[in-house]
């Protein structure tokens, strides 16, 4: 039954529903007056997720170590005295001293910078390279898709660790840029596959066909319509990949082909002190603990982001 308060009297004396009632109800239902979006709902879910917030807090702490290590320690990681070699933790030196007699806590703090730098550089590059290849391959299809897909298959067939060892064996310098290069050369393939699949699914949807019918260019369709709606799974995988690249850098350094001593790196710390696990286990516990915590935080954050962006859970 129609509410009399929602009726207006027209010129002929008849009554009609108030045209603004439905709009007002929609505004009230949305709360803020704006329709909800996938990213808006995802942000609300992430804020309410204790796993994501704890992971984010840990990553913020590690990032502050990399960006501003002097906020955490005043010790110089390269001020060493061999007479203090492998001294256990003491007051003022909570991690003790390493093999060279350097403050181990300072090494752990400064070791965050190369690990995160390599992971960030490599992830940004593989998202750019793999995302571009996947976007072009999925959008245009045909012979371009066939060529790019076969190139992707060739790189996918290369064992990641063995390929990285070969790439690093071909360069003389072992620094942040060369280690990142080895990860980039072999790490872009999965991003390309994810982007290609998302673009193929989206390119025939109604909004894309409508844009094409209105005369939009291929570039505008790709970057204004398809890319914003296909980037979510790529960002989720990129978050997890950050943790994978932190672990990969430590693995390559542990094997002796990554960063070299006396560089401050968690991988270097593990490599130098692995033989002292029986007598001085704390020399491994501290860098391994920081490494595992960082990798696990990236993975948990990526999982939470994936769940928040899953339309089936909205």
Image (spheres, rainbow, N blue to C red):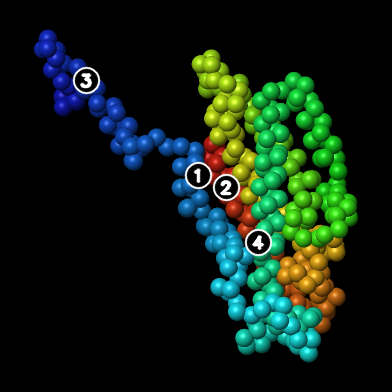
The residue under label 1 is 42
Q: Is residue 60 left or right of residue 248?
A: left
The residue under label 4 is 294
- Could you say whether the residue bearing mark 2 is in a helix, strand or loop? helix
- Could you say whether the residue bearing mark 1 is in a helix, strand or loop? helix
Q: Nearer the viewer, mark 3 or mark 2?
A: 2
**Residue 15 visible to an observer of this rendering:** yes
Disc 4/disc 1 C-alpha distance (Å): 23 Å
Image coordinates of residue 54 in percent, x first then y, are 55, 60
Image coordinates of residue 298 in percent, x first then y, are 63, 55
Disc 1/disc 2 C-alpha distance (Å): 8 Å
Disc 2/disc 4 C-alpha distance (Å): 16 Å
Q: Is residue 155 left or right of residue 191?
A: right
Dot 1 or dot 2: first in sequence order is 1
Q: Quadrant of residue 128?
A: top right
Disc ID at residue 17: 3
């Amino acid at each position: 039954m129609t509410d009399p308060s929602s009726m207006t009297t027209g010129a002929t004396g008849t009554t009609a529903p108030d045209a603004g009632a439905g709009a007002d109800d929609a505004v009230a239902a949305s709360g803020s007056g704006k329709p909800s979006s996938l990213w808006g709902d995802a942000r609300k879910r992430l804020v309410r997720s204790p796993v994501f917030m704890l992971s984010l807090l840990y990553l913020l702490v590690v990032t502050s170590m990399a960006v501003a290590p002097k906020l955490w320690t005043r010790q110089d990681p390269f001020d060493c005295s061999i007479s203090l070699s492998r001294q256990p933790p003491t007051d003022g030196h909570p991690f003790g001293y390493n093999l060279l007699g350097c403050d181990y806590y300072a090494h752990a703090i400064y070791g965050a910078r190369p690990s995160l730098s390599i992971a960030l550089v490599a992830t940004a590059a593989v998202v750019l390279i793999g995302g571009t290849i996947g976007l072009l391959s999925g959008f245009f299809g045909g012979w371009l898709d066939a060529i790019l897909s076969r190139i992707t298959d060739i790189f996918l067939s290369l064992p990641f660790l063995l390929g990285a060892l070969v790439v690093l064996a071909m360069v003389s310098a072992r620094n942040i840029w060369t280690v990142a290069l080895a990860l980039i050369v072999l790490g872009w393939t999965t991003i390309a596959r994810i982007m290609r699949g998302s673009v193929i699914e989206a390119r025939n949807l109604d909004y894309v066909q409508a844009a094409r019918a209105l005369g939009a260019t291929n570039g505008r369709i790709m970057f204004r319509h398809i890319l914003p709606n296909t980037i979510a799974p790529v960002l989720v995988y990129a978050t997890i990949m950050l943790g994978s690249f932190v672990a990969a850098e430590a693995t390559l350094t542990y094997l002796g082909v990554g960063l070299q001593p006396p560089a401050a790196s968690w991988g270097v710390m593990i490599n130098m002190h692995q033989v002292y696990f029986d007598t001085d286990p704390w020399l491994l516990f501290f860098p391994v603990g920081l490494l595992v915590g960082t990798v696990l935080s990236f993975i948990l954050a990526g999982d939470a982001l994936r769940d928040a962006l899953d339309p089936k859970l909205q």
